Image (cartoon, helix red, strand yellow):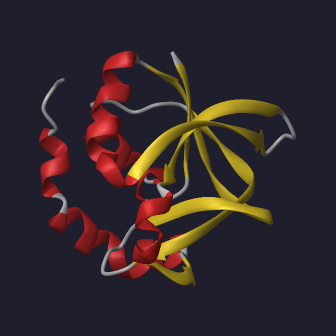
Amino acid sequence: MENFFAYGSLMCGDILSAVVGQPHRHRLAVLPDYRRFSVKNEQYPAVVPNSGHSVPGLVYHDITPAEWGRLDRFEQERYDRRLVRIFTEDGCRMQAWCYVFRPEFRLELTGRNWDFGQFLAKEKQIFVARYLGFRHIEEG
């Protein structure tokens, strides 16, 4: 069981639970030396390495191997799961897995920072309706 750093739609506990099948305990965390961008024509973001920037998010604990399989299928081919260094809200440094946008898809990024507040206010409903299938991710 391992930690998962979420920085986009999966920061919503209901969406994470729909993807992995159950809720998980979590804490606020920050991913240093990365930047979060909007993806063209999508409601969700991507992160890419970018020195001097940081990305706020949540770290979920105790993700099981079966749940990792579901997360990998949810994120699909545009993201690589990488082990990164994060800092929790209480200053604890730890490692967590994070889905990082693959360089060959970089042209799909808008160049605009993605905003979680805007996602909650204006885009979450669209995302949930559009990605209804994430509730039914087949087991590997």
On the image, the x and y values in percent for residue 22 come to: 33, 30
Foreground: 103 or 124?
103
For the view shown, which residue lies furthest in the right direction?
A: 91
Foreground: 63 or 80?
80
In this figure, what is the number of numbered marks?
Answer: 0
In-image side of 123 versus 46 (left or right):
left
Q: Is residue 96 above or below residue 89?
A: above
Looking at the rendering, which quadrant does residue 89 occupy? top right
Residue at image x 63%, y 33%?
A: 96
In-image side of 59 versus 124 (left or right):
right
Foreground: 54 or 117?
54
Give the position of the C terminus as an image quadrant: top left
Q: In this view, does 99 lie above or below 4?
A: below
On the image, the x and y values in percent for residue 71 come to: 34, 37
Residue at image x 42%, y 50%?
A: 79
On the image, the x and y values in percent for residue 102 come to: 47, 55
Residue at image x 20%, y 48%?
A: 134
On the image, the x and y values in percent for residue 18 come to: 26, 42
Looking at the rendering, which quadrant does residue 121 occupy? bottom left
Foreground: 6 or 140?
140
Residue at image x 41%, y 65%?
A: 105
